[in-house]
């Protein structure tokens, strides 16, 4: 079969040619990055996903090719046949891998013309994200976006290979299902065959992976799309990809060890970086106390330190009152920030207040002693003790918050991130950490009713079981989260696999037996037929690629993402549908006035 290409076939990609190829006859194809007419010669930078090479056409030597070259514009798709030549001395381009050579064209064909693109296909540049998303196929032509997709592919391939070698099998689970227990809002899919009934899209394969354990699969994984109808942020999309894992006959330590080996393997394969294992572990309580968050960024120190004991009995009223009412005084030592102006401190105070602090007490440390309104009331002995506790040096700035202990830590945790940014403390590299021993339950913000922090199949820690009914909020879960550079990559847990325990937890959660039956009956039924002890984890794949690609938004590592308001600017989704389709789906649209 002959096609438009005739007998022209690419011999090389556009980033491949070097001085050692001089004299070679080549056929190249790609997009026109730029065309310049100079001194009677036409220069074309020809781009493909592999790189850029310079093509030269001489109107004297190859008039037909030059005529064709004159017609091309940016982003035309062309094919070139020619000979590789060394660039004349002084015209080499050291910034291009192919910069020592050029291809002298003998023939040139236009394979497709192109409109002027709405933005230049180059990295950098300040293109509005809405325009990028509308013309995503052009945006993805940019080298950096291609690199993100390659990194994503490499990580996925490495993860698949690793898990396969560890005896895991990838099993697909359905997309049209009954509701799952992750606790977000479901996307609904109306059933045409069953009027008034709906499928939902999975928030995760949670129940199916547990059923696969009952089925004796033992080691399951899936790189799987999940759907949650939530308000979006930079690191959230309505559909996202998870590396979903479940294992039988294991405890939390095995899931944790397996996950960290997998991640280290993937980072090594995809980026060539060595990530030491095991990753450090913090309990939830430690993370909250020392970093004010359950996803601490451990690329830098500057921990939150409790100094209640040191300021007790000083004349500083704010501290005395907080301590008297059962609160704490906690603080941070910002290295080298002792010279911060009143305005800078006020900005920091605004950050702390926005994060729930009642106020912020600065103590500027200099060689002679300390400055700041509190110094006088605190007095020299307390100040000396504070310096020692924080390991502070002259030129540092202590920032203290008084209040309920957890709240003080949370406010200081926010401040810690802000200060790290301002002081340039955030180093490069990957700081992985596990956060373990999460609380099992939390009160709902609206009505204080108990709900599961992870999901209602998460097993409590054995040693806390006696507290389950009496002091449920003190019960810790056999749950773990993996954090990278302050971003929660995902988490998982050991599951409840015995019916009695599950009923006990449903009772504590106030889920009546008939409600439990209705929602999860199939899982509870399955558990009557012999469920092995099991547990697993799910890692947010988009976030993982985002952090490893050094990006701040998961939209940068997803080929066709949605906007913050969950629309697809390229296809126009969501959009109205044909009234007939609505009718078939038994749906009537109610227009809100
Ligand atoms: N299904 C959970 C989630 O998607 C993860 C797990 O417990 O394995 O967050």
Image: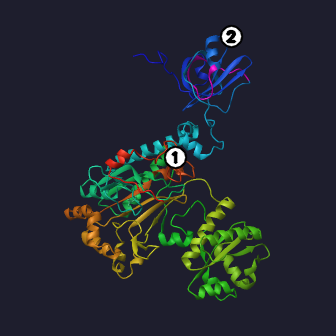
Q: Spot the residue most to the front.
A: 593
User: What residue sits 58% from the left and 40% below the top?
Assistant: 144
Crowd tier of the residue under label 1, counting other residues whose Cα lies within 10 Å: few below 14, some 14–19, many 20 or above? many
Which quadrant would residue 407 be assigned to in this image?
A: bottom right
Front residue of 548/584: it is 584
User: What residue sits 25% from the left and 61% below the top?
Assistant: 522
Q: Position of residue 469 (x, y in %)?
A: 34, 80
Which quadrant would residue 71 be assigned to in this image?
A: top right
Q: Residue beneath label 2, please?
A: 60
Q: Residue beneath label 1, please?
A: 557
User: Magenta segment, which residues?
Assistant: 71-89
User: Is residue 257 inside the magenta stretch?
Assistant: no
Quadrant hosting ligand 1: bottom left
Residue 123 sits above or below residue 264 on the image: above
Crowd tier of the residue under label 2, counting other residues whose Cα lies within 10 Å: few below 14, some 14–19, many 20 or above? few
**Residue 272 visible in image:** no
Report how far apart the C-alphas of labels 1 and 2 lie in the structure. Answer: 47 Å
Q: Position of residue 494 (x, y in %)?
A: 35, 64
């Amino acid at each position: 079969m002959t096609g438009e290409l005739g007998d022209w076939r690419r011999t090389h990609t556009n980033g491949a040619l070097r001085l050692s190829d001089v004299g070679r006859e080549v056929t190249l194809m790609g997009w026109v990055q730029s065309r310049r007419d100079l001194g009677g010669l036409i220069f074309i930078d020809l781009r493909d996903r592999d790189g850029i090479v310079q093509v030269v056409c001489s109107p004297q030597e190859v008039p037909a090719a030059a005529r064709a070259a004159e017609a091309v514009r940016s982003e035309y798709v062309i094919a070139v046949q020619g000979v590789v030549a060394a660039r004349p001395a002084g015209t080499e381009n050291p910034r291009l891998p192919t910069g020592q050579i050029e291809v002298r064209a003998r023939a040139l064909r236009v394979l497709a013309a192109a409109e002027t693109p709405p933005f230049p296909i180059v990295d950098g540049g300040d293109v509005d994200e809405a325009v990028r998303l509308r013309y995503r196929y052009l945006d993805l032509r940019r080298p950096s976006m291609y690199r993100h997709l390659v990194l994503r592919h490499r990580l996925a391939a490495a993860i698949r290979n690793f898990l396969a070698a560890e005896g895991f099998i990838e099993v697909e689970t359905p997309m049209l299902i009954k509701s799952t227990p992750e606790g977000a809002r479901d996307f609904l899919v109306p059933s045409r065959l069953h009027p008034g009934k709906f499928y939902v899209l999975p928030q995760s394969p949670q129940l199916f992976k547990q059923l696969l354990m009952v089925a004796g699969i033992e080691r399951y994984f899936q790189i799987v799309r999940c759907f949650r109808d939530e308000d979006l942020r930079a690191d959230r999309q309505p559909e996202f990809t998870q590396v979903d894992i479940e294992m039988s006959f294991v405890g939390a330590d095995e899931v944790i060890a397996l996950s960290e080996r997998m991640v280290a393997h993937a980072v090594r394969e995809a980026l060539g970086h060595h990530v030491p294992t095991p990753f450090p572990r913090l309990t939830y309580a430690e993370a909250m106390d020392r970093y004010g968050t359950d996803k601490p960024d451990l690329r830098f120190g500057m921990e939150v330190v409790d100094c209640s004991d040191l300021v007790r009995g000083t004349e500083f009223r704010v501290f005395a009152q907080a301590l008297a009412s059962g609160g704490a005084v906690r603080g941070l030592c910002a290295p080298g920030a002792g010279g911060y102006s009143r305005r800078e401190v006020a900005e920091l105070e605004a950050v702390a207040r926005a994060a729930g602090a009642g106020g912020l007490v600065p103590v500027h440390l200099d060689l002679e002693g300390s400055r700041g309104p509190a110094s006088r009331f605190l007095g020299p002995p307390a100040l000396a003790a504070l310096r020692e506790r924080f390991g502070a040096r002259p030129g540092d700035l202590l920032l203290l918050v008084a209040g309920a202990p957890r709240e003080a830590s949370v406010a200081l945790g926010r401040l810690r991130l802000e200060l790290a940014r301002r002081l340039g403390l955030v180093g490069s590299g990957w700081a992985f950490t596990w956060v373990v021993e999460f609380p099992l339950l939390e009160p709902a913000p609206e009505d204080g009713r108990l709900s599961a922090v992870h999901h209602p199949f998460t097993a409590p820690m054995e040693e806390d079981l006696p507290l389950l009914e009496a002091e449920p909020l003190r019960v810790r879960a056999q749950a773990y989260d993996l954090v990278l550079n302050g971003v929660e990559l995902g988490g998982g847990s050991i599951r409840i696999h015995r019916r009695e325990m599950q009923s006990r937890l449903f009772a504590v959660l106030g889920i009546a037996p008939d409600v439990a039956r209705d929602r999860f009956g199939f899982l509870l039924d399955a558990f009557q037929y012999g469920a092995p002890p099991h547990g697993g984890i799910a890692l947010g794949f988009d976030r993982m690629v985002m952090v490893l690609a050094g990006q701040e938004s998961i939209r940068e590592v997803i080929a066709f993402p949605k906007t913050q308001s969950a629309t697809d600017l390229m296809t126009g989704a969501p959009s109205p549908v044909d009234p007939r389709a609505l009718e078939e789906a038994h749906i009537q649209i109610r227009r809100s006035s």
